[in-house]
Image (spheres, rainbow, N blue to C red):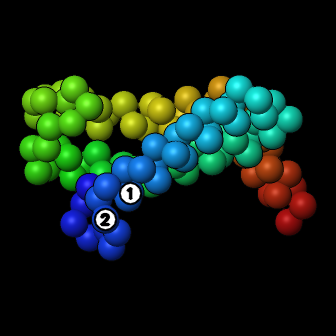
Amino acid sequence: MPDWVPLSKDLVVLLSGGAELVLGLAMIFGARWKVWIGVALAVFYVLIFPGNISQYANHVDAFGLDTDRKRLIRLFFQPVLILWALWATGALKALRHLRRSGKRGA
């Protein structure tokens, strides 16, 4: 966890874990809101990215990531997770549609 986060590191881990559980359950049971869930997942992955960078920069072992190489590889998969969340839920298509319809209306 980056030092600039003004909360207890344990609290942030608990809160982010809770968010992961809620978002995972939403993916299973919230098909009606899948586009919004995809956007929420993408935002979540963006928000936790600084923690992943901090873990790499400070050589912190956690969750089986016990080498700098493993931590660095994870950094490259974060954008993949973001795009995957948007694509798998239809959010990417919906966002493109909104963008196109906004240009036509202007």
* Residue 20 image position (x, y, % from top left): 52, 40
Q: Is the residue marked by circle 2 packed among few (<14), some (14-19), or many (20+) residues within 10 Å? A: few
Q: Are marks 1 and 2 in contact (CB under 8 Å)?
A: yes
| Image coords of residue 33 (percent x, y) | 81, 40
Q: Residue at 31% of width from left, 55% of height from top?
A: 10
At mark 1, the secondary structure is helix
User: Which amino acid lies under the numbered mark 1 shown in the image of this protein?
Assistant: Val
Rendered position, 23 above or below 80? below
Q: Which of the labelled discs sits on residue 8, or is there none?
A: 2
Q: Secondary structure at mark 2?
A: loop
Type of the residue with mark 2: Ser
Q: Position of residue 22 (x, y in %)?
A: 62, 41
Quick one: 46 or 12, which is closer to the camera?
A: 12
**In front here: 70 or 29?**
29
Q: What's the distance in space between the residues labelled 1 and 2, CA to CA?
A: 6 Å
Crowding at dot 1, Cα within 10 Å, few <14 / some 14-19 / many 20+, comes out as some
List the residue tagged with mark 1: 12
Q: Which one is nearer the viewer's eye here, 48 or 90?
A: 48
Residue at horizontal 75%, vertical 51%? 99
